[in-house]
Image (spheres, grey):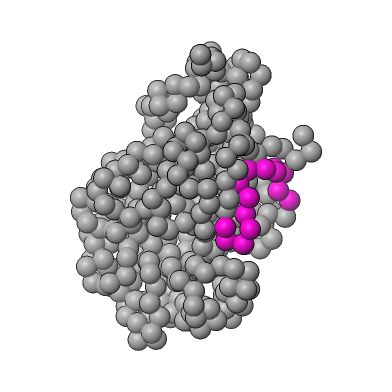
């Protein structure tokens, strides 16, 4: 018989981890991880952890808003059954609207707690389809010279897929992409504009790369998130696959992108959608024949473990963008292991498999 999983306590604390070097995208630079660790304790003493990854330009949230949501929900969650994940997720959605990062961190913690208590893990609940997945590595907005040096090191370390962040400055972006392609001629190139281009300039970028005989396999979120017509124009005007990222937070968002034929691929990020809604988006894409990508924000081992188990458990992802950007001091150990670009699941771990260092 399944053991009850009544919630004793819901709490959260801020997590700040300086990065080895700033991570720069079109919307700005991040010198450190600024997330929130959510903790759920069950009546039997089992606990679970999750990570909320707010990034205001992307999901409109901050560590402060996440902490406020958790504080507001703490009393309502007390005495509830953690197994009622979908019901609790719906309650959060009705109470706080989107607040995807906060909801995701809480859902992760609930999944971790329940599966730890049951002696299993979310990877098995998702279907346990793959024991290993291979990630790309993202080169942020740096000089062409630095990007080429990074590409050389990454290929030497076993990476075969490189994702290049775009700044929205056409000539700078052309220089950076050409430099990476020259430094890593055998690597698969993906591009990510983070909403930085109008459709005409996005097509100019691809035309310029074509003249340089550089053919990316994917262009992610070339245009502003709400302008699906612009993204459709890019898709219609090129042969490169187009991925929707910031355009898709919810199941309804994914349905709109698919119905509008605005993208070939949808990027699911737990920080945008949470495990519950993310699983629904995954099912919709598979039913509709839309390609799947798994992505991440700047996250510690907790968030990465959740995303790796999600992607490997469900399977079907053509693009894996789960590259951890090195924090100077990581306070967690365990979870899926990473060797070069290869993530490996331990099927016998409980929950996310992550524990606090030294505990």
Q: Nearer the viewer, residue 135 or 272?
A: 135
- Please say if 115 is above or below 15: above
Q: Is residue 344 left or right of residue 310?
A: right
| Residue at point 38%, 69% (across, down) | 217
Which residue lies most toward the right here?
358
Residue 208 location, x and y as percent? 36, 82
Residue at 60% x, 19% y: name it: 42
Query: To which quarter of the image does residue 29 belong?
Result: bottom right
Dividing the picture into quadrants, the one containing residue 90 is top left
Q: Is residue 277 visible?
A: yes
**Along the line of sight, which residue is nearer the eye, 166 or 116?**
116
Q: Is residue 183 above or below residue 44?
A: below
Q: Is residue 129 left or right of residue 230?
A: right
Rendered residue at 57%/78% (across/down): 148
Residue 180 lies in the magenta-colored region: no
Asked whether, in this view, residue 224 is left or right of residue 133, the answer is: left
Nearer the observer, 287 or 31: 287
Location of the C terminus (image quadrant): top right
The one nearer the camera, 242 or 292, is 292
Q: Is residue 113 visible?
A: no
Indicate the position of residue 172 as horizontal and vertical percent values. 47, 78
Residue 128, horizontal then vertical, whole percent: 47, 41
Magenta region: which residues? 329-342
Q: Is residue 337 magenta?
A: yes
Task: Say above or below: 264 vs 104.
Answer: below
């Amino acid at each position: 018989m399944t053991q009850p999983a009544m919630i004793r306590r819901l709490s959260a604390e801020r997590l700040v981890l300086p990065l080895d070097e700033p991570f720069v995208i079109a919307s700005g630079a991040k010198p450190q991880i600024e997330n929130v660790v959510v903790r759920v304790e069950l009546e039997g003493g089992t606990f679970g952890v999750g990570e909320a990854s707010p990034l205001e330009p992307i999901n409109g949230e901050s560590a402060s808003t996440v902490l406020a949501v958790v504080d507001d929900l703490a009393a309502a969650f007390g005495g509830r059954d953690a197994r009622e994940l979908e019901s609790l997720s719906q309650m959060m959605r009705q109470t706080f609207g989107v607040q995807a990062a906060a909801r995701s961190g809480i859902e992760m913690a609930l999944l971790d707690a329940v599966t730890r208590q049951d002696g299993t893990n979310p990877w098995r609940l998702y279907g346990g389809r793959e024991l290993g997945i291979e990630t790309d590595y993202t080169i942020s907005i740096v000089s062409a010279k630095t990007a080429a040096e990074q590409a050389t090191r990454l290929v030497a370390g076993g990476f075969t897929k490189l994702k290049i962040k775009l700044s929205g400055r056409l000539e700078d972006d052309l220089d950076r992409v050409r430099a990476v392609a020259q430094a890593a001629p055998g690597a698969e190139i993906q591009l990510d504009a983070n909403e930085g281009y109008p459709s005409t300039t996005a097509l100019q970028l691809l035309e310029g790369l074509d003249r340089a005989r550089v053919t990316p396999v994917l262009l992610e979120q070339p245009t502003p998130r709400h302008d699906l017509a612009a993204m459709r124009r890019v898709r219609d005007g090129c042969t490169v696959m187009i991925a929707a990222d910031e355009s898709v937070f919810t199941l309804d968002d994914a349905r709109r992108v698919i119905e509008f034929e605005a993208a070939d691929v949808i990027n699911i990020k737990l920080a945008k959608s949470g495990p519950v809604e993310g699983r629904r988006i995954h099912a919709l894409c598979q039913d509709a024949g839309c390609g799947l990508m798994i992505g991440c924000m700047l996250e510690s081992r907790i968030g990465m473990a959740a995303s790796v188990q999600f992607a490997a458990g469900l399977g079907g992802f053509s693009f894996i963008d789960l590259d951890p950007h090195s924090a100077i001091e990581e306070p967690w150990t365990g979870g899926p292991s990473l060797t070069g670009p290869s993530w490996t699941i331990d099927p016998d771990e409980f929950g996310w498999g992550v524990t606090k260092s030294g505990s």
